[in-house]
Image: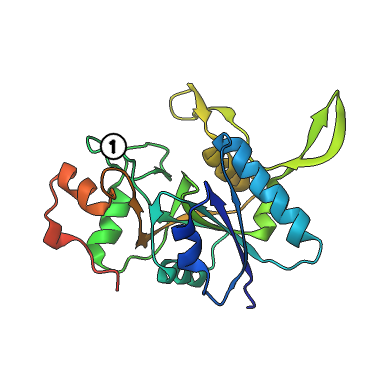
Amino acid sequence: MLISILVAVLMQSEGSLFRLSQHPDVIGRIAVTNKRIIDARNELLRTLDLEFGLQDRYTHALFVDSDMTFTPRDLDRLIAADKDIIFGLAFKRTENDPSPAYLPLSGRPDDHEPLLEVLASQKLDPIQVRAGGMAFTLIKRSVIESVKRRVTIDGKDSDMFEYFWDMFVRNPSSGRIEHLTEDYSFCQRARDLGFRVFLHPAVQLGHVGHHPITIRDWFKTIGIEFDQIPNRA
């Protein structure tokens, strides 16, 4: 399958761009700075669509947050998985709670048993989840085209599309109304359309703060020794 990837960088970072600049499947890069996250994500995809969409030049978009640490091989892993939406294992940037930033398939935010089982097995195969952040996320173009909607201005459809917006949904287990941020609602809408969302446990990212928050920090908080961290080679 011919792959052509556009890299969409939230908050411009030369480091993030440089790490992927030589990848053979990357055909272009766009970056947005100084905007609210939801506005920046929408502008990135609108720009992508305007500059590359008409020529059918891309098959995937890779969202990258500039405060993530990763390697070009991490992109290779996402490509090889061949999923509708797949993202790397990123962690919250708080030392007291550096838990993984995703929503498990069960819908319970703290239900990390499926992830821990895969990590313990050393196979590190992708696992299906409900949603995840866009810190390092590869999305097929078919998903992007399916979830977008026209922006309404003064009660009329405009020529502008949006891809990300917040949602309020009812949790089927608790019956409570819950708020979904723009990245989680993107995943929810894709799932409603029949697409599937995956987390790749071999793509272990660092979230830059005082130091990069990584899987080591999470393992430390849940009592797993560092020498038990899986080898993702």
Of the pair 205 and 144, the residue shown nearer to us: 205
Is 193 placed above or below 175 here?
below
- Residue 72 x, y percent position in the rendering: 44, 69
Around disc 1, counting alpha carbons within 10 Å, would you say few (fewer than 14), some (14 to 19), or many (20 or more)? few
Q: Is residue 227 left or right of residue 145?
A: left
Residue 25 appears anywhere in the view: yes
Of the pair 205 and 188, the residue shown nearer to us: 205
Q: Is residue 26 left or right of residue 78?
A: right
- Residue 58 x, y percent position in the rendering: 69, 66
Tell me the quarter of the image containing the N terminus: bottom right
Of the pair 32 and 199, the residue shown nearer to us: 32
**Extreme right residue here?**
156
- How many numbered callouts? 1
Query: In which image quadrant can residue 192 be found?
Result: top right
Of the pair 191 and 187, the residue shown nearer to us: 187
Query: In which image quadrant can residue 230 be found?
Result: bottom left
- Residue 155 x, y percent position in the rendering: 86, 24
**Extreme front residue here?**
14
Residue plotted at (57% across, 43% down):
33
Q: As shown in the figure, which amino acid type bears the numbered disc 1?
A: Thr
Q: Secondary structure at mark 1?
A: loop
Label 1 sits on residue: 94
Q: How is the image coloured?
A: rainbow
Tell me the quarter of the image containing the C terminus: bottom left
Residue plotted at (56% across, 77% down):
24
- Residue 23 x, y percent position in the rendering: 52, 74
Residue 189 appears anywhere in the view: no
